[in-house]
Amino acid sequence: MFELIDQGGIIIILIFALSIVAAAIIIERLIYFKKIQGDEEQLIRRLKTTLEKRHFDEALAICESNPSPITNLMRVGLEHRGYSEETIKQTVTDAASLEVPRMERHLSSLGTIAHISPLLGLLGTVTGNIQAFGVLGEFGAAGDPAMLAAGIAEALLTTAAGIIVSIPAIIFYNYLVSKVNHYIIRLENRVSELVMLLKGPESMVEIESDGARERTRY
């Protein structure tokens, strides 16, 4: 490892540092998505059951003890349940837009690493070739083969390292972006569902009460 770093020079050190950052971002984002999707369906069923019983305080407690994009929307809707249906929908939609940057956290950095890693490798290729041709220019064909080989080694190592870092970074970047887009669609679908949960049962109660008053009148 240290021999490769010594041969690749400062460029390969930069590429190695970027690989560590990329790996940290990928692991952190994978853990994040696994956490928020782990028991989401079970959590939604609990909230539905609680809201159908009109136990709003219990529903709020569930949301606060299980933070995720979905429960954050539920919490905002519950806090504004006394407002009109249109107001609730707009408020929850605004809250959903705030969740998007949290889901996209560090993804731009991962995309940047995926793009600049091969460029750094190319830069190492250029500097390695400059070093190799510098040896030839100074000493001619009788130059030190070890110095010539050092320049060629730097060129090849940095190119390979840049590509090795770039390929998995691009793959995971595209995968994580697709996860974010998929989750955004799910959040949009949950907005209407939440409004129905908050206002639907209440509307049914009002309709039943009106019907009872009509029967009493007759």
Image: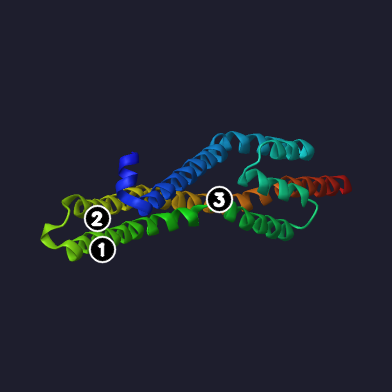
The residue labelled by disc 3 is 103
Using the rendered image of the protein, determine whether residue 136 is visible from the camera's viewpoint. Answer: yes
**Which residue is nearer to you in this view: 195 or 202?**
195
The residue labelled by disc 1 is 130
Identify the element where label 2 is drawn.
helix
Of the residues tagged 1 and 3, which is closer to the observer?
A: 1
Using the rendered image of the protein, determine whether residue 52 is visible from the camera's viewpoint. Answer: no
Which class describes the residues within 10 Å of circle 2: few (<14), some (14-19), or many (20+)? many
* Residue beneath the point at 65% across and 43% down: 71
Q: Amino acid at mark 2?
A: Gly
- Residue 190 placement, left or right of 137: right
Q: Are marks 1 and 2 in contact (CB under 8 Å)?
A: yes
Q: Are marks 1 and 3 in contact (CB under 8 Å)?
A: no
Marks 3 and 2, how far apart in space? 43 Å
Marks 1 and 2, how far apart in space? 8 Å
* Render colour scheme: rainbow
The residue labelled by disc 2 is 151
